[in-house]
Image: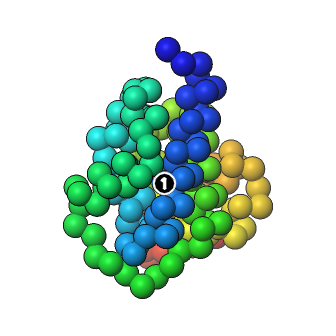
């Protein structure tokens, strides 16, 4: 059994490498992040499987392509922003104990991408808490007013 800090660091490196593959992919990177959260490998990694945490990013990427119908796109997401999103999700995974699926349902990669600035200027902890607060507040306002927007 590996030390928890080693597993966390391995997971962090692998998720960052995987998101880098996403940024270079002909598919929409944000759709790939969503698909990744549903993969058997990510679900098992979230449950603590060392084998699935240590699975090579290229193999996970190929699993995503095999398991999902994704349309090719011309859009190119900024690798710096995707790196930050990877850091935020991995940090939150280990600090809050949330699965990737739970995190993506709470704060979507699209929303994080759109609000990278100013969120990236604060700590990962504060960025997550601000995002959850803003989205939670906006969800309540949307219910009360019928307005469906969530912005900073």
Q: Residue at x 29, y 51 (%)?
A: 63
Is residue 56 rendered to the left or right of residue 83? left
Colour approach in the figure: rainbow
Task: Tell me the quarter of the picture where residue 43 sits.
Answer: top left
Q: Is residue 145 visible?
A: no
Residue 37 in the image, given as x and y percentages of width and height: 38, 49
Is residue 122 rendered to the left or right of residue 25? right
> Is 80 rendered above or below residue 12?
below
Q: Residue at x 77, y 61 (%)?
A: 121
> Is 70 rendered above or below residue 21?
below
Residue most extreme to the bottom = 74
Q: Is residue 26 visible?
A: yes
Residue 23 in the image, given as x and y percentages of width and height: 51, 68
Q: Residue at x 51, y 32 (%)?
A: 97
> Is 98 rendered above or below residue 67?
above
Category of crowding for the residue at label 1, using alpha-carbon neighbours closer than 10 angstroms: few (below 14), some (14–19), many (at least 20): many
Task: Tell me the quarter of the picture where residue 131 sits.
Answer: bottom right
| Count of numbered circles in the view | 1
Residue 110 in the image, given as x and y percentages of width and height: 48, 68
Residue under label 1, please give it: 18
Q: Residue at x 65, y 66 (%)?
A: 80
Task: Classify mark 1: helix, strand or loop.
Answer: helix
> In the rendered view of the protein, which quadrant contains the C terminus?
bottom right
Is residue 44 rendered to the left or right of residue 77? left
Query: Which of the pair 47/12 is nearer the observer?
Result: 12
> Is 31 rendered above or below residue 49?
below
Query: Which of the pair 88/146 is nearer the observer?
Result: 88
Residue 139 in the image, given as x and y percentages of width and height: 46, 62
Query: Which of the pair 139/111 is nearer the observer?
Result: 111
């Amino acid at each position: 059994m590996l030390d928890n800090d080693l597993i966390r660091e391995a997971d962090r490196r692998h998720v960052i490498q995987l998101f880098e593959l996403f940024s270079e992919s002909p598919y929409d990177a944000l759709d790939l992040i969503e698909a990744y959260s549903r993969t058997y490998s990510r679900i098992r990694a979230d449950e603590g499987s060392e084998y699935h945490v240590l699975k090579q990013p290229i193999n996970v990427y190929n699993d995503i392509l095999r398991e999902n119908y994704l349309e090719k796109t011309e859009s190119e997401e900024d690798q710096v922003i995707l790196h930050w999103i990877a850091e935020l999700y991995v940090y939150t995974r280990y600090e809050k104990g949330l699965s990737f699926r739970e995190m993506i349902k709470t704060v979507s990669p699209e929303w994080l991408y759109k609000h990278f600035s100013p969120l990236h200027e604060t700590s990962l902890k504060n960025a997550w808490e601000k995002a959850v607060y803003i989205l939670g507040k906006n969800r309540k306002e949307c219910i009360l007013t019928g307005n469906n927007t969530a912005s900073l």
